[in-house]
């Protein structure tokens, strides 16, 4: 039996020039995405940057204007029947039958899958409910659920089967901080069991907290992708000097070639110079600057994003 | 090429050795019964086979969902109420010894067969079907069929059915089969309610056919069942039309309203003599031919024309729905 879990390249999702055009507007513009197997892949971008549109194309819900996509090594949407039973998905929020109980919603979605064994249906639904902490509310009608509970039920539907790939489109939307933490720990747990997780988000820190890899989108275009550590390293950290003598410190640093100086109340920050940082520190002390703290702050993904786009992380026009 | 082709009806599924689905790997104590209970490690989850019997699960799920909706039950309640109202009206009208209507299916005084109801309660079945077939029954079908795809689209549940993956062709077939089941159930609800009311308010007995011959009550009951089946089959065309409309929009309300609007339009066109050229192609044109089953011998010409026309509508609008739904962007 041929392996269906990723091609020879070991990637779970691959797109080649994937494009979706709505009228004159390019929602997704020549996207080349590679999601390695076993990764927790953050798909990062502000609202309107084309994340959901990409996911819809990957799941065979909408037809690309041009380009191709492979999921689990098979072309989508042509092999949807083979691919999708191994994929759990939460796309643009949960959608439920309000007049059915939470449990019956899961049974309904499970019976839509022709590869799902009806004999284990109830047991799998109970296990999925348990996993997202909804067992107590399983008999309640879904229309009485809070947004957070709906989100969990949507997640439970994605977990009705063991999956090779989970696609989660902004899974923490509408959740309180506690709910967000629970989702994140669930994602880590699933990843540790071997499921590749493709997680879209407009929240930088969320991606930084759970993802091993990330891709950054703005206005339908992919700006960068790779391991999170590398992306952050790509943006250089900032030299930070904590001192009561900010004026003197700024003067000395400028003489040493530190660019982009920013002075705040008791801190001076700037781009690290070419010179050895030990020499920089010595020069500060020599000039009589009372140094309380000295070092290079680790670059965050946000720094990387700002460095890449030259702009803040705002909603696309 | 339509996408529906790509994920055509399951059954030609993945060839996989072994006779049961891959069991879940052991992740500790097996608490839940059965194999593959519970979401488990995915690292060794291969593709699962498609089972022909399992693909019917979607149809069963459709049926249960349709008949659990408050709206469906309300429609059936309205349909069940029509024979009650007709029966009571006839009873009151005739309690002073008067008579109703001009007799015969083409008589001018109300629905077909109404004049015979006082003599034989079984005729209430024919009267009620004749009274509901022009509007109440097809309207109910239009609501259910129009909502079939568009309702799921506007609720957003359509995208989750499709990634389950239900398969577009399979989902459409399940929806159409469910709508046809509803046609049958709705017709039977009218017939059974009419039979009950007829038996309660009027005497039962031998039946006089339109041709004037007399047949036994048992034979009459059989004809009533046959008529109910023909009436249900008369709704096949509306069901296909409604399903097609349902694939055109992402608003359940719009699809229902459009289907019911088309129904009314067709009924009006069928009444305009100047448009007689198109009349034989209107899905409602031969609807009342079911009365020919009450002739002795049965007069088949219009009955066959009716069934052929319904099959034509099912073929044309079923294909149109399939082509449209197979290529549709699901953006809700
Ligand atoms: N069905 C649609 N019709 C027209 N434009 C759309 C449609 N869906 C999305 N768009 C546009 O495509 C862009 C990307 O949207 P989306 O993929 O939903 O972004 P994200 O999920 O990153 O917030 C937006 O500008 C949005 O307005
Ligand atoms: Mg989105």
Image: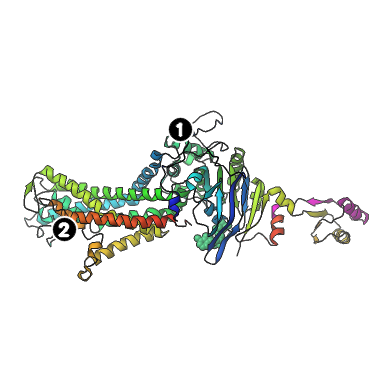
Residue A6 placement (x, y as % from top left): 58, 44
- Where is B117 relative to B108, above or below? above
| Range shown magenta | A274-302
Q: Residue at x 15, y 60 (%)?
A: B110
On the question of residue B85 being in view, the answer is no
Residue A126 placement (x, y as % from top left): 48, 37
Query: B43 or A211, which lies in front?
Result: B43
Residue A81 placement, left or right of B127: right
Residue matched to label 2: B111
* Sooner in the amino-acid sequence: mark 2 or mark 1: 1
Q: 10 Å neighbourhood of mark 1: few (<14), some, or many (≥20)?
A: few
Instruction: Give the quarter of the figure containing the N terminus of chain B.
Output: bottom left
Query: B31 or B213, which lies in front?
Result: B213
SS class, disc 1: loop
- Where is B22 relative to B239, above or below? above
Residue B296 placement (x, y as % from top left): 10, 50
Residue matched to label 1: B20
Does the magenta-highlighted stretch encompass residue A299? yes
SS class, disc 2: loop
Query: A96 or B232, which lies in front?
Result: B232
């Amino acid at each position: 039996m041929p392996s269906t879990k990723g091609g020879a390249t070991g990637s779970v999702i691959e797109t080649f020039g994937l494009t979706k055009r709505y009228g004159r507007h390019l929602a997704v513009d020549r996207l080349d995405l590679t999601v390695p197997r076993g990764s927790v892949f953050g798909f990062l971008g502000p609202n309107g940057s084309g994340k959901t549109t990409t996911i819809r194309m990957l799941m065979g819900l909408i037809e690309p204007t041009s380009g191709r996509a492979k999921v689990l090594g098979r072309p989508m949407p042509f092999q949807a029947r083979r691919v999708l039973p191994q994929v759990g998905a939460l796309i643009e929020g949960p959608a439920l039958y309000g007049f059915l109980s939470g449990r019956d919603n899961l049974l309904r979605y499970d019976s839509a899958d022709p590869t799902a064994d009806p004999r284990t249906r109830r047991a799998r639904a109970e296990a999925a409910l348990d996993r997202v902490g909804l067992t107590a509310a399983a008999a309640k009608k879904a229309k009485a659920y809070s947004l957070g509970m709906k989100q969990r039920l949507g997640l439970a539907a994605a977990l009705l089967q063991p999956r090779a790939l989970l696609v989660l489109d902004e899974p923490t939307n509408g959740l309180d901080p506690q709910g967000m933490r629970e989702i994140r720990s669930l994602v880590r747990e699933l990843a540790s069991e071997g499921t590749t997780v493709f997680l879209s988000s407009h929240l930088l820190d969320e991606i930084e907290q759970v993802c091993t890899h990330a891709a950054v989108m703005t206005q339908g275009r992919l700006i960068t992708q790779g391991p999170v550590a590398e992306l952050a390293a790509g943006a250089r950290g900032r030299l930070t000097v904590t001192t009561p003598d900010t004026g003197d410190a700024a003067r000395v640093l400028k003489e040493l070639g530190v660019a982009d100086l920013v002075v705040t109340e008791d801190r001076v920050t700037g781009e690290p110079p070419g010179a050895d940082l030990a020499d920089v520190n010595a020069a500060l002390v020599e000039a009589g600057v009372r140094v309380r703290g000295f070092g290079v702050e680790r670059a965050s993904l946000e720094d990387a994003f700002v460095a890449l786009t030259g702009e803040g992380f705002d909603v696309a026009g | 090429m339509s996408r529906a082709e790509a994920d055509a009806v399951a059954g030609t599924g993945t060839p996989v050795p072994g006779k049961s689905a891959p069991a879940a790997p052991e992740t500790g104590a097996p608490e839940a019964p059965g194999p593959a209970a519970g979401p488990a490690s995915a690292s060794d989850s291969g593709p699962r086979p498609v089972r022909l019997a399992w693909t019917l699960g979607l149809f069963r799920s459709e049926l249960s969902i349709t008949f659990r909706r408050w709206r469906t039950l309300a429609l059936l309640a309205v349909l069940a109420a029509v024979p009650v109202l007709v029966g009571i009206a006839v009873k009151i009208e005739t309690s002073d010894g008067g008579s109703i209507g001009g007799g015969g299916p083409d008589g001018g005084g109300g629905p077909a067969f109404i004049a015979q109801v006082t003599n034989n309660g079984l005729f209430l079945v024919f009267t009620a079907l004749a009274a509901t077939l022009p509007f109440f029954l097809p309207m109910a079908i239009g609501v259910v069929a129009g909502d079939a795809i568009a309702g799921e689209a506007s609720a957003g549940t359509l995208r989750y059915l499709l990634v389950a993956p239900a398969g577009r062709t399979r989902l459409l077939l399940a929806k159409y089969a469910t709508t046809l089941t509803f046609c049958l159930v709705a017709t039977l609800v009218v017939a059974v309610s009419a039979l009950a009311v007829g038996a309660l308010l009027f005497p039962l007995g031998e039946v006089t056919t339109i041709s004037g011959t007399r047949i036994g009550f048992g034979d009459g009951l059989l004809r009533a069942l046959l008529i109910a089946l023909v009436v249900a089959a008369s709704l096949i065309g509306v069901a296909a039309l409604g399903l097609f409309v349902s694939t055109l929009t992402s608003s359940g309300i719009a699809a229902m309203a459009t289907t019911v609007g088309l129904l009314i339009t067709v009924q009006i066109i069928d009444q305009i003599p100047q448009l007689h050229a198109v009349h034989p192609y209107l899905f409602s044109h031969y609807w009342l031919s079911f009365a020919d089953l009450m002739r002795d011998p049965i007069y088949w010409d219009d009955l066959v024309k009716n069934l052929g026309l319904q099959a034509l509508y099912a073929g044309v609008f079923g294909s149109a729905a399939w082509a449209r739904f197979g290529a549709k962007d699901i953006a809700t």
